[in-house]
Amino acid sequence: DLGHFRHYMQKEIFEQPTAIANTLQRVLELGCKPALFGPEADTLFANAPAVRIVACGSSYHAGLVARYWIEEWTGLPVSVDIASEYRYRKGREQDGTLIVAISQSGETADLLAAMRSARERGDVKVLALCNVPHSTLTRESDLLFLTQAGQEIGVASTKAFTTQLVALYVLAAALAQSRQTLSASALDEIVGALHRLPVLVEEMLALDGELDKWAHELSHYNHALFLGRHTLFPIALEGALKLKEIAYIHAEGYAAGELKHGPLALVDENMPIIVCAAADELLEKLVSNLREVEARSGKVFLLAEPGCEAAHDGAHRVLTMPVASGPLAPVVLTLPLQMLAYHTACRKGTDVDKPRNLAKSVTVE
Ligand code: M6R
């Protein structure tokens, strides 16, 4: 039932505060405890020599964000692989490696094949992060965390993606707890931030009208670049994927530092550039990347946390987030990118919930 929404995708965007709160329910009662992933998790987490994440599409982007959290909080080596590539690679896995298989549906053929292939490469353990309780993935995994996004009908992943991010954040904190790589106060701060998350996400929904105005402009272009750094780099990839998937606009996501290694050649007054900015230690670097774009008349649409004023000069449009969200910035900044893609698609009149050529669940190779 759509209620007052025009599309399932729009409804699912607006359900995110609830989906995230539901996913966090046990976490907020218990803390980021390894036991949330299964009775064996504490020992497996404490002894894993490495983490390998495998996934497809948006779930892969969630994995890319998780790498920053896990590396920073645990020092563990983390690799993130596209499942369709991993399954045909030949490398071995170190015994005890934690394979994190991320999938909304739990039925993606390449992901299932990647998980089975990982088991043949070493004595690994598979942790499934999934939104569908009785899926093939959940049945074949050793450890499990279920996101509580509820059914997602729109082909474009929205609430499934943000709840995956939340689950991965909890995983990173739980790994740190098992491995004792963070002080109690640092862990408390990481867990404490989760309490505010549903409200932060709710506040982002108020930006919907402004993003519709941006969409009006964006809908006149055939191409777009999305930029970010650190955890916002995978969010730039996700924003670009959303725009191509439902608005049929050719879009590429880049780590802003990669600009001058090629994509800068594409920048002129006909290239809109959507930028996600956080007030972190890389802000200064991002600002100099933006100067390069602006010097070539690229049109910068800036989504910035408070404290990023240095990036405002020269931007074509600026939208400032209500509050800074620290390590949770990639979750929070995903929402405006979803709304931007959604409104651009509506203005172009595409079939938002069922974009051409795509299926919700890719159960064939
Ligand atoms: O069900 P899964 O998470 O395994 O699906 C993976 C991708 O097919 C999926 O995320 C796809 O990229 C979305 N349509 C993106 O919006």
Image: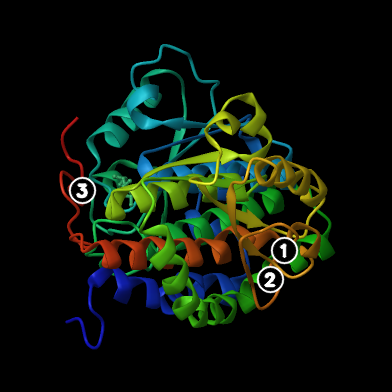
- Measuring 38% from the left and 68% from the top, which residue is drawn there? 148
Q: Position of residue 117 (x, y in %)?
A: 34, 23
How many other residues sit within 10 Å of disc 1, few (<14), some (14-19) or many (≥20)? Answer: some
Q: Is residue 125 above or below residue 149?
A: above
Circle 1 residue = 326
- Measuring 22% from the left and 35% from the top, which residue is drawn there? 109
Instruction: Give the label on residue 193, or none.
Output: 2
Q: Is residue 118 above or below residue 293?
A: above
**Beta carbon of the mark 3 residue lies under 8 A of ligand 1:** yes
- Residue 127 in sight: no
Mark 2 or mark 3: name the one nearer the start of the chain: 2
Circle 3 residue = 361
Mark 1 or mark 3: name the one nearer the start of the chain: 1
Instruction: Assess whether mark 3 and mark 1 are in contact (beta carbons under 8 angstroms).
Output: no
Asked if residue 72 lies left or right of residue 215, the reply is right
- Measuring 71% from the left and 70% from the top, which residue is drawn there? 324
Instruction: Assess whether mark 2 and mark 1 are in contact (beta carbons under 8 angstroms).
Output: yes
Task: Please state which amino acid type lies under the numbered disc 1.
Answer: Gly
